[in-house]
């Protein structure tokens, strides 16, 4: 930590390996010098002892650095070096939290940006996979308005989040980012759930590109490869069963948190953000294509109503912000309201009861498997089974085995 009264940095568990060897070496050399001034040893003996000490200390330092030091490079922070694998971490969003859990690091997660959008209930279907939900809910960065103080208080060894998000969403300055990076721990992360923010003018990553970076961070590349192999097989199997492109529905993806929605924030499926990954993999088309309607972003908070929807009249409507509901609960509340609404009831999707939950805003690799399964059943029930059925499209035990290290 930085001592503001002196400006001197004290030794912590994060820098002791980096500086420990040189501190130890200096102490030994100082002791040898003191002993030689007291007499009793020849100059040759003292010099030999000093040389041996210097060699031993140098070798110890070099060995420690060679054995433990590694780097992870990810925009926007660039190359970040770690002396050892972080033993505590926090993520801003549920996507990066899910990556850490997938890599076997759930026990080391101390908190999250906001627990409300971290849908960890999917782990209930994975034998032997769980997190300390109570601890995570107690340590929400949002409870302190993302203040620097809570970063100091939680004292994690890495922060899985995009620091530019802190600057552009929460009013941090670059010097605040630098302060926390230096005095607490570095940031590693990239805002990947959407690609519509003007301030994000650096590289984006796909879900699995970002997941690979997190695997490098936690030195879990083998577990990542096992997960990627499972994912690739699952997606390939789904895609071989999809109907021809001209027989797939067009989809309107929107956000409205009310059970009686009247206005909606639109999302664009042509945006390649990870929150739309399952819809891209399922090959559906965007009902807003060619309409001029833009997607939700930091600077665009425009909304559409049922009259606008009726002009588009999509085959399927996907509604976000209802992920705590089951499929049946959603139908009994939101769809029921729309069926009784004078304008909404005229929509083709409402008439055909093709209004569904739209998936998480933030999704990681485990969550994506569940969301892709759900999406396939929502859009193609004749092929993959009804979304309210017990049909499973991927092996839960295999996922659990990878998370638990049995692969």
Image (cartoon, grey):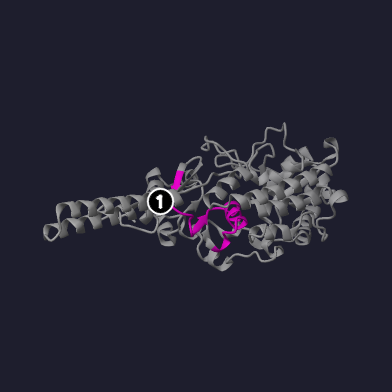
Task: List the residue tagged with mark 1.
Answer: 63
Give the residue furthest to the bottom.
134
Residue at 50% in and 57% down:
89
Task: From the viewer's perspective, tell me whether residue 284 is left or right of residue 53.
Answer: right
> Does residue 360 appear in the picture of this structure?
no
Q: Quadrant of the C terminus?
A: bottom right
User: Magenta part of the protein: which range?
Assistant: 80-107
**Which of the two residues, 168 or 119, is positioned nearer the viewer here?**
119
Q: Quadrant of the N terminus?
A: bottom left
Residue at 36% in and 53% down:
60
Give residue 148's position: percent from left, percent from top: 41, 54
Which structural element holds mark 1?
A: helix
Give residue 364's position: percent from left, percent from top: 63, 51
Task: From the viewer's perspective, tell me whether residue 103 is left or right of residue 39.
Answer: right
**Which of the two residues, 173 or 67, is positioned nearer the viewer here?**
67
Residue at 12% in and 57% down:
37
Give the residue furthest to the right.
382
**Which of the two residues, 57 or 397, is positioned nearer the viewer here?**
57
């Amino acid at each position: 930590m930085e001592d503001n009264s002196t400006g001197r940095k004290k030794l912590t568990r994060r820098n002791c390996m980096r500086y420990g060897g040189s501190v130890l070496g200096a102490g030994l050399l100082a002791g040898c010098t003191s002993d030689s001034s007291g007499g009793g040893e020849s100059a040759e003996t003292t010099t030999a002892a000093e040389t041996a000490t210097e060699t031993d200390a140098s070798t110890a330092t070099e060995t420690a650095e060679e054995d433990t030091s590694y780097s992870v490079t990810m925009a926007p922070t660039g190359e970040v070096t770690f002396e050892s694998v972080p033993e505590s971490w926090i993520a801003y969003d549920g996507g990066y939290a899910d990556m850490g859990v997938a890599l076997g690091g759930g026990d080391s997660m101390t908190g999250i940006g906001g627990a409300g959008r971290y849908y960890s209930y999917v782990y209930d279907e994975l034998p032997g996979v769980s997190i300390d939900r109570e601890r995570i809910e107690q340590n929400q960065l949002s409870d302190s308005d993302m203040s620097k103080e809570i970063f100091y208080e939680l004292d994690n060894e890495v922060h899985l989040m995009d620091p530019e998000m802190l600057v552009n969403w929460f009013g941090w300055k670059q010097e605040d980012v630098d302060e926390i990076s230096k005095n607490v721990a570095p940031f590693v992360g990239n805002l990947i759930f959407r690609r519509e923010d003007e301030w994000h003018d650096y590289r984006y990553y796909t879900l699995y590109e970002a997941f690979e970076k997190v695997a490098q961070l936690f030195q879990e590349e083998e577990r990542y490869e096992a997960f990627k192999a499972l994912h690739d097989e699952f997606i390939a199997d789904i895609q071989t069963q999809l109907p021809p492109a001209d027989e797939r529905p067009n989809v309107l993806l929107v956000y409205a948190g009310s059970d009686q929605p009247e206005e909606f924030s639109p999302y664009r499926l042509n945006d390649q953000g990870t929150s739309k990954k399952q819809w891209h993999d399922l090959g559906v088309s965007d009902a807003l294509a060619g309409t001029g309607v833009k997607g939700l972003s930091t600077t665009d908070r425009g909304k559409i109503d049922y009259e606008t929807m009726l002009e588009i009249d999509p085959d399927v409507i996907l509604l976000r912000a209802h992920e705590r509901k089951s499929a049946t609960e959603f139908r009994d509340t939101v769809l029921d309201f729309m069926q009784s609404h004078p304008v909404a009831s005229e929509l083709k999707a409402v008439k055909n009861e093709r209004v569904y939950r739209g998936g998480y805003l933030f999704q990681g690799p485990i969550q994506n498997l569940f969301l892709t399964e759900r999406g396939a059943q929502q859009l193609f029930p004749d092929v993959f089974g009804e979304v309210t059925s017990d049909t499973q499209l991927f092996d839960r035990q295999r996922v659990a085995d990878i998370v638990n290290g049995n692969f």
